[in-house]
Image (cartoon, rainbow, N blue to C red):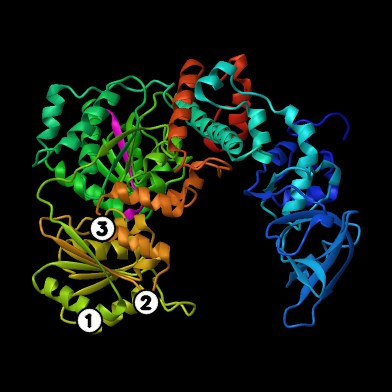
Amino acid sequence: MTGEPELQTPVQYVKGVGPVRAVQLAQLGIQTAEDLLTYFPKRFDLRRQVQAIGTVHDGEKNVTIAGEVIEARYVPKRQRPYFECSIDDGTGSITVKWFHGGYLRNKIAPGVTIAVSGAVRMFDGFLQLINPALQILYDVSGVDLDSNELLPVYPAGAKLSSGHIASIIKKALPTLLPLVGEWHDGAFLSRRGLLDRRSAIAAMHHPEDTDHWKQGRRRLAYDECMLMQLALAVQRASDISRPAHAMEATAAINARIRARFPFQFTAAQNRAVVEISADLARPRPMNRLLQGDVGAGKTVVALYAALTAIAHRKQVALMAPTEILAAQHYRKVTGFLAGSRVRIALLVGAQPEKSRRYLLAQLKTGEIDLVVGTHALLGKKVKFKQLGLVIVDEQHKFGVDQRSSIRGKGYAPHYLVMTATPIPRTLALTVFGDLDVSTIDELPPGRGKTQTRQTTARNMPEVLRFVCQRLAAGQQAYFIYPLVNTSEKTELKAAISAYEQLRDGELSQFKVALVHGQMKAEEKDDVMNRFAAGEIQALVASVVIEVGIDVPNANVMVIEHAERFGLAQLHQLRGRIGRGRQDAVCFLVASAVNPIAKRRLEILCQTADGFKIAEEDLRLRGPGEFFGTRQHGLPELKVADLIEDFELLRLARRDAFAIVNEDPALAAPHHQALRHAVIKTYGGRMGLITGG
C-alpha cells in the first residue's frame, strides 16, 4: 500500500509496523492506524535524568543510567537463579543483576541498549544494581535521556511487551497525529475548558506532567460520553419522529380508572401518573422508564396508563420476562378489572396451538384490549388492530433490539418500561439515556419492615428454629440456593438436595415444595400458585423467584451461600418478603467471603434503599457487569469512567441533545466528523440510520 496513511489505514502499513507486528497488534484489538493512536497507556513510570556511569558511586539510592549491553548471561542452577549483564556508556561500565530473571534471556543481549533505575551497591569490589526498573531502548535516537520523563506503560500481550508497543507508537505518532480532526470549534472547547482533540491524544501518550495527562484524559473521556449521548439522542429523535395517538386522561377517565383501585395512590405514584399522562396526551410516542423499588406499586401506575389507552379504544401489550411473572400480572390485572368491560388475554409460549391461533385472530381484529405475555408477543404472527401502548416489565431481561421490534408501522405506540432494579443515575443516562425517567421512591403505607441478618452455616439450627416458629404461626418462608443440582466441583448446597433434607428433616411437619428453572413451565406455575394460595408453607427455590413473585404472607427468607449472589440480585430476592403488613426477616447465610462479597452483605444489612444499593453495586462491579450493559449496545469505554466522570457525562449529554435538537440527523456540514464517529462506534448497535 502506497501513499500517506489515513486513520482507517490497516495498521500493517503504518511506519514501523509491518505484517508480523500487525498480526500481533490485531490480537490486542489494533486493526487500523486509529486503533493504534487510541491504544492508551495504563499508567506512567517516572524515569529520571540519566547520569554517566563513571559518576556513579556506592550507596546511591535512586540512580538512572543507560548504556549498551556488553555481555549477558543467565545462571539457572542456584537457589536464587539470576540474569546479569554488563552495560557501558563510554564513561564506564557496571553490572546489573535480576534474581529469577530468566524471562530477560530473550530480551537483553549484547548490542541492546537499556536504561535502568535503582540503588547502587558494591559487591566483590565492583559496583552493581540489583533488580532495577528496566527500559529497553528500541530507538535510542528518539529518547531524551537528559531530562526526567514519564514513560508510558501500555497493556502488553500477544508476545508484545509494553516497551515494544511504546516504541511502535512513538515512531507512528508524528505521522498519525496530524490526521486527527477536531469535532468542535475553538469557542465550544474554550467554554468547556477542553483541549483540542489532537493535543489530547498526544498528552495521553507523552504528557509533560500529570496535569497535562489529566487534561488530555478529560477531553477524550468527554468525547466518549458525547458519542454515547449523541447515539442515544439520535435514537430518541428517531423514536419520536413518527406520530402517535394522543390519549388524554380527562377528568372523567381519571375518575373511572381510580375507582378501580381499592386504595389511594401514594404521592410518588400520583407524580408518576401525572408525568405519564402528560406524555400520553401528546401526538408523539412516549418513551418513559418507570423505576421504583420492589413493592413500590409500579404495576398499578402502569395499569393506569393502560386503562387510559383503552379508554381511547386503543390496544395495550404488557410484556414480562418469564411465564410465571406474565401469569402473575395477568391475575393481578384481572382482579383489578373484575366486572369491567375490558377484554384481557394471556399469551405465552406454552399455549396450545388452537387457542393461540384464536387469540391472535382476536388481537388482529381488535377484540382484545389488553394482552399480557412474554417474548411471545414479539412473534411475527402477532398483529394488532390499533396498538396504542407497550408496557415492558424488567426491560433489562430483554435485548435492546427488541425494544423497537414491537413498534410496527404507521402510528407508533407509546412505550413504558418498568424496572424494580433501581438504576444508578449514571446508567439512567446511558443504558436508558433515550428515555424520560419517572421514579416511585416511596412504598405504600402499612407495609411491614424487613430486617436483614448475616449469619453462617454453623448457626443454621438456630435459623431453622426461628423459621419453624414463623411457619407454626401461619406465615410462609423461602429458602434460596444458587444451584439447582449439587456439583462435584463445588461444596455448594443445591436446591434439590436441600429440599429433600428440609422436607424429611427439620421441616417435616410442614408442607414443603421445590421450584427451579429446569422444571416445566406448568409445573413451576402449579407450585407457585399453590404457594400463593397458602397450600405450601415453605418454598425451596433457585433464583427463579428473583423477579416479581408476590406472596404477602411470605415473611421469612433464608438465602444460603449468599456470598455467591450479586448485590442487586440479593436485593431483588429480599424484595419477595415484607410485601404484607407483617415484619419480615431475611437471613444471609454465608461462608468465608472475600472482601468484595463481604462488602455486599454489609451493605444489604445496612440499608433497604434500592437506589443506594444500586449505586454501591455499580461501584463494586463496574458498568461492564452491572445490568448487562453489553446487550444494550454500549461498547466498552477506553477512557471514561461512568462513576468518576458523572458530571462530565451530564455535560456531554446536555451538549449532545442540544446538537441533535438543532440537527436530528447530524446532516449539517460542521457535524460530519461527529456523524462519522457516531456511526462508526454505534451505528450497528443502536439501529441508527447510516445512509445519506
Q: Residue at x 36, y 23 (%)?
A: 244
Q: Is 220 displayed left or right of 297 in the figure?
A: right
Image height check: is 595 above or below 279? below
Determine the secondary structure under disc 3: helix
Per the image, the residue denoted by label 2 is 493
Residue 107 or 127: which is nearer the viewer? 127
Image height check: is 477 above or below 231? below
Per the image, the residue denoted by label 1 is 461
Q: Is residue 316 magenta?
A: yes
- Image coordinates for residue 121, horizontal then vertical, percent: 74, 67
Kind of residue at disc 3: Gln
Q: Is 641 displayed left or right of 138 in the figure?
A: left
The earlier-in-sequence mark between 3 and 2 is 2
Name the mark nearer the viewer: 3 or 1.
Answer: 3
- Image coordinates for residue 209, horizontal then vertical, percent: 63, 39
The earlier-in-sequence mark between 3 and 1 is 1
**Which quadrant is home to the N terminus?**
top right
Task: Point out the stretch of residues depicted in magenta.
Answer: 314-323
**Which quadrant is home to the C terminus?**
top right
**Res. 600 mark:** none
Q: From mark 1 to mark 2, how far is it between C-alphas?
A: 16 Å
Determine the secondary structure under disc 1: helix
Image height check: is 622 above or below 257? below
Kind of residue at disc 2: Lys
Per the image, the residue denoted by label 3 is 606
